[in-house]
């Protein structure tokens, strides 16, 4: 079974721009979660989607948004990029059961200049 | 609020020795815990999980111990190998919650 895939793997943007990242979950998984990873803050939860609905949201500003499609693929968007948005953005999928075992993709490395 | 922390940010062990990575959590209502391994340039890789109704679970060369009395979680890696060098994260899920809270991570270095 193929793992979680994320595109693109690397991205360079400038301040003020917006960016869209994509995640394809493991086949059959209906839950997709997004995390931001930085050296200073570690892994921080952004949001989680299940069956096209946002079920949970972390403490990030409204510039961070996401969506999930009927095939469970998910995108996250960051508008008006700031230097502090430079990070590794990780997507994780799970079957959505109570145990919530999440399987991560390789991440998208975003650099904001 | 929820917080998951690690006692040591770095750990160095000799190849072949056993490693123990510790994690403290603060939410006594957490019902599910996971250990992840993250190698450089990769996303976190699932290692082993444990539910709160258990106190020990074993996998291949790894054992997770859960002490709910002191809210402590540990990962034991037997006969560590160079490929075990990575950052290890513990994560918890609060009861009824739909998200994982991660600790800061421990960097494990294996010395030859």
Image (cartoon, grey):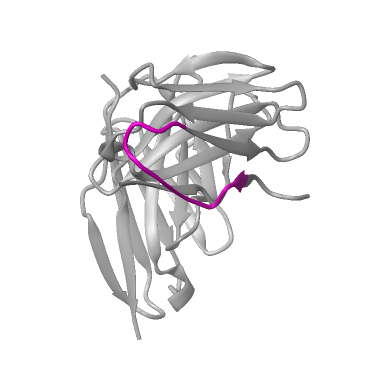
Where B101 sits versus A103, above or below?
Answer: above
Left or right position of A84 against B99: left
**Is residue B108 within the magenta segment?**
no
Residue A95 falls left or right of residue A44? right
Pick the residue in front: B5 or A112.
A112
Task: State whether residue A57 is above or below residue A17.
Answer: above
Task: Please indicate whether residue B91 sits to the left or right of residue B48 in the image.
Answer: left
Q: Nearer the viewer, residue B70 or A96?
A: A96
Can the viewer see residue B56? yes
The residue depicted at 71 percent of the width and 27 percent of the height is A72
Q: Residue at x 34, y 22 (%)?
A: A60
Comparing A72 with A81, the one in front is A81
* Residue A58 image-quadrant placement: top left
A11 part of magenta stretch: yes
Residue located 30% across and 44% down the image: B23
Query: Number of numbered discs present?
Result: 0
Tell me where residue B107 sits by quadrant.
bottom left
Whole-percent x and y of residue A2? 75, 50
Front in this rendered view, residue B31 or A89: A89
The magenta stretch is A6-18
Q: Position of residue B112 (x, y in %)?
A: 35, 86
The reply to whether residue B81 is in sight is: no
> For residue B10, what is the image quadrant?
bottom left
What x and y, as percent, mark residue B60? 58, 61
Residue at image point 64% right, 19% down: A50
Q: Position of residue A109 (x, y in %)?
A: 44, 50
Residue reaching furthest to the bottom: B112
């Amino acid at each position: 079974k193929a793992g979680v895939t994320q595109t693109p793997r690397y991205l360079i943007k400038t301040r003020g721009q917006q960016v869209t990242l994509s995640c394809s979950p493991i086949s059959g998984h209906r839950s997709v979660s997004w995390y931001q990873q930085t050296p200073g803050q570690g892994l921080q939860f952004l949001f989680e989607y299940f069956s096209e609905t946002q079920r949970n949201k972390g403490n990030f500003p409204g510039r961070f948004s996401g969506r999930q499609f009927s095939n469970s693929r998910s995108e996250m968007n960051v508008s008006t990029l700031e230097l502090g948005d430079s990070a590794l953005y990780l997507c994780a999928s799970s079957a959505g059961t109570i145990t919530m075992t999440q399987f991560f993709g390789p991440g998208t490395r975003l650099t904001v200049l | 609020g929820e917080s998951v922390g690690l006692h040591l940010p770095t750990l160095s062990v000799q190849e072949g020795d056993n490693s123990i990575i510790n994690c403290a959590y603060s939410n006594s209502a957490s019902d599910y815990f996971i250990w992840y391994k993250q190698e450089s340039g990769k996303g976190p890789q699932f290692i082993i999980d444990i539910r709160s109704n258990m106190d020990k679970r074993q996998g291949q060369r790894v054992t997770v111990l859960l002490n709910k009395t002191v809210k402590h979680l540990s990962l034991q890696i037997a006969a560590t190998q160079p490929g075990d060098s990575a950052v290890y994260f513990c994560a918890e899920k609060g009861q009824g919650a739909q998200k994982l809270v991660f600790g800061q991570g421990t960097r494990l270095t294996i010395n030859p």
